[in-house]
């Protein structure tokens, strides 16, 4: 921490990451009752320098009792002196709420050093004398309330504002840290800040030339209706970029730190993308051997590979994994093509994207159809990683290591045939075997495998073959040390699974009915399962998958990565995620030769000591083989 004396008080300056002189610098200004700690989430990155300044009267800056020090134009003057002393000639300026108003005041008075202004949930100012007077009276009331209640009660009352209500959904530890930081401020200084730095004493920047002087980006949380409207309406009159984030309130950086980080990165490094086209190739892939489940058998799988191209000519690939028949879940390939063409692709038209995480937000008006969404969303993750010049592994900050994998074996003609098949997979090095079962083609098969391979890490997948009335029948499974039984009951049931789990010892793992983080929460709270098969496409893409992984880690769930008989495109994506630290069981990730006669990508995944290595090139790392297929236009 550095203390810098100015004409209007001494300020505390915090370098949040190791300073590198060659790097760009982001200066951050916190909100009312906040501190430099607001921006600690930016410590995770090393791409740019982060300087957070405690505003006057806040945290480590001077607890000044001098009214003048709190006037916005004097704060701006102090900041100019600070930047001068730091020899900071050029920087990006981020201001949250009150800090956003300080940032505007500074940038308007001293525009030369500011490359770009990023405003998070900040008011531009009021238009009429009447509004300003009203605001002043209200500030006075707040200050009186602070004097009467003291810091703690005042903060608790302050937090009751609808601007912050969504924060209560955060982890209690995060929420309490936020409250604690505010309670520790000096009440006299907070009162001065409230009164002297008020919106009542600033111009309405929408009526100034600020927007012609500096490029501006405005961020709001969609649940904060007031500031979202301010951003939206103002962006129509003035030249600036407006971004609103779903499922976040006023304090966007607290509720969606990754998204805010991505937005900052995109602005600093000019990595904002626009989709130019979406196209697809339609493949028909022949399986090396038929895949039989409790609901049907296939010899061939159709796979559409989506190709997303940006205006700066980056190409991302995503796989549509749905089946032609709605027998695994209700989604079908034919319908997904329609959904992408008519409903998803148009949502991306002429949109600036700062983060792959924004795609889930953009797709939110369209219900369900997760696999359709995932095909496009994952292609856009590929684009962003490529634009940054790193593998998706690295982009997600997941280590690149060989991954222990399992194999999913379809129902075989006979027990002898099954033992042979399993034996050959074990010889190849697979560390976990999953048997597909259906009623009648189960116990004898399990028994045969268990007898032949007493120590094998073995599990079964029923794909909804049983009914709750089969509970006594299913109890027999408990004698075979199965790691788990996947989706024994209906593909949309949670309740009966919870009843079943109470009566059988074998852990239930849910697959078909997990379409979102909400589904995982429901399953956990009902006790429907102990494990989750996480398939990126079944939950609508990588953003939701990552949220599920973070939740699973906190709840210490058994979680592993499932497959959809993907071609090399989807498989490479799966392998990029499979080293995520939340996974704790080998996934359905097999070598290329287990699946198709011929794959769609140049690369092959081979098994080495039971492990597969993710690819290393940028993005998902694949190159599509040349083909003479017709290309289908979606956008
Ligand atoms: O239920 O997990 C399933 C494949 C297609 C459809 C459903 C399922 C499966 C698998 C995974 O078992 C096979 C794989 O991709 O290795
Ligand atoms: Mg399954």
Image (tube, rainbow, N blue to C red):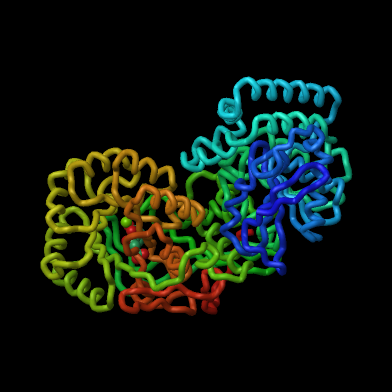
Which one is in front, 399 or 86? 86
Q: Where residue 413 appears, x then y in whole percent?
A: 19, 67
Indicate the quadrant where residue 590 lies.
bottom left
Please tell me in which quadrant of the rendered image residue 634 appears.
bottom right
Is 180 placed left or right of 535 in the picture? right
Q: Residue furthest right?
A: 209
405 relative position to 230: left or right: left
Image position of 155 with respect to 424: above or below = above
Q: Residue 508, position in %: x, y?
A: 26, 50
Total count of labels: 0
Question: At 62% across and 67% down in the image, what residue appears?
Answer: 388
Residue 208 in sight in this render: yes
Seen in the picture, residue 612 relative to 361 is either above or below; the reply is below
Q: Residue at x 35, y 77 (%)?
A: 607
Q: Nearer the viewer, residue 145 or 501?
A: 145
Quarter of the rendered image showing ligand 1: bottom left
Vertical placement of 68 versus 256: above or below? above
- Please indicate, yes or no, whether residue 270 appears anywhere in the rendered image: no
Q: Is residue 29 left or right of residue 375?
A: right
How far from the left and from the top, in percent, is residue 340?
56, 54
Residue 535, given in percent of the width and then of the height, sits at 41, 57
* Quadrant where the image shows the C terminus: bottom right
């Amino acid at each position: 921490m550095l203390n810098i004396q100015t004409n209007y008080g001494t300020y505390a300056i915090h370098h949040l990451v190791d300073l590198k002189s060659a790097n760009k610098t982001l200066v951050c200004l916190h909100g009312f009752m906040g501190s430099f700690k607001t921006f600690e989430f930016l410590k995770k990155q090393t791409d740019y320098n982060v300087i957070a300044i405690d505003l006057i009267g806040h945290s480590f800056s001077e607890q000044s009792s001098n009214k003048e020090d709190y006037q916005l134009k004097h704060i701006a003057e102090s900041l100019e002196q600070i930047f001068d002393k730091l020899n900071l000639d050029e920087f990006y300026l981020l201001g949250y709420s009150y800090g956003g108003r300080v940032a505007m005041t500074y940038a308007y008075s001293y525009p030369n050093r500011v490359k770009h202004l990023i405003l998070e949930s900040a008011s531009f100012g009021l238009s009429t004398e009447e509004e300003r007077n009203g605001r002043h009276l209200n500030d006075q009331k707040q200050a009186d309330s602070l004097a009467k209640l003291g810091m703690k009660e005042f903060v608790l009352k302050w937090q009751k504002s609808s601007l912050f209500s969504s924060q209560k959904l955060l982890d209690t530890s995060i929420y309490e840290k936020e409250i604690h930081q505010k309670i520790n401020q000096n009440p006299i200084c907070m009162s001065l800040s409230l009164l002297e730095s008020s919106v009542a004493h600033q111009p309405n920047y929408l009526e100034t030339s600020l927007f012609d002087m500096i490029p501006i980006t405005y961020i709001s949380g969609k649940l904060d209706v007031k500031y979202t409207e301010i951003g939206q309406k103002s962006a129509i009159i003035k030249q600036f970029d407006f971004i609103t984030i779903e499922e976040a309130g006023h304090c966007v950086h607290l509720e969606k730190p990754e998204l805010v980080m991505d937005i900052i990165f995109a602005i600093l490094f000019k990595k904002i993308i626009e989709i130019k086209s979406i196209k697809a190739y339609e493949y028909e892939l022949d399986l090396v051997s038929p895949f039989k489940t409790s609901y049907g058998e296939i010899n061939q799988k159709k796979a559409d590979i989506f190709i997303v191209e940006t205006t700066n000519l980056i190409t991302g690939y995503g796989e549509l994994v749905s089946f032609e028949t709605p027998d695994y879940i209700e989604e079908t390939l034919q319908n997904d093509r329609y959904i992408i063409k008519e409903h998803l692709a148009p949502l991306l038209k002429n949109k600036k994207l700062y983060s792959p995480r924004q795609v889930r937000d953009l797709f939110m008006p369209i219900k369900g159809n997760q696999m359709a969404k995932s095909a496009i969303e994952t292609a856009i993750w590929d684009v962003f990683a490529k634009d940054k010049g790193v593998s998706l592994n690295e982009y997600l900050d997941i280590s690149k290591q060989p991954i222990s994998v399992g194999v999913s074996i379809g129902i075989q003609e006979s027990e002898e045939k099954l033992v042979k098949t399993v034996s050959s997979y074990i010889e190849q090095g697979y560390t976990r075997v999953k048997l597909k079962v259906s009623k009648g083609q189960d116990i004898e098969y399990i028994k045969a495998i268990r007898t032949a391979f007493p120590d094998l890490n073995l599990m079964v997948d029923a794909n909804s073959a049983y009914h709750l009335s089969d509970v006594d029948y299913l109890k027999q499974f408990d004698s075979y040390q199965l790691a788990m039984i996947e989706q024994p009951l209906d593909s949309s049931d949670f309740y009966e699974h919870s009843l079943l789990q109470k009566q059988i010892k074998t852990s239930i793992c849910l697959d078909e009915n997990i379409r979102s983080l909400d589904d995982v929460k429901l399953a956990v709270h009902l006790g429907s399962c102990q494990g989750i098969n996480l398939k990126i496409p079944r939950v609508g893409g990588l953003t939701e998958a990552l949220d599920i992984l973070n939740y699973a880690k906190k709840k210490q769930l058994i979680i592993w990565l499932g497959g959809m008989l993907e071609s090399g495109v989807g498989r490479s994506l799966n392998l990029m995620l499979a080293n995520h630290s939340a996974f704790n069981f080998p996934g359905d990730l097999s070598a290329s030769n287990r699946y198709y006669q011929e794959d769609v990508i140049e690369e092959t995944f081979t098994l080495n000591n039971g492990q597969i290595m993710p690819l290393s090139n940028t993005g998902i790392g694949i190159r599509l083989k040349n083909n003479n297929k017709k290309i289908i236009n979606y956008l």
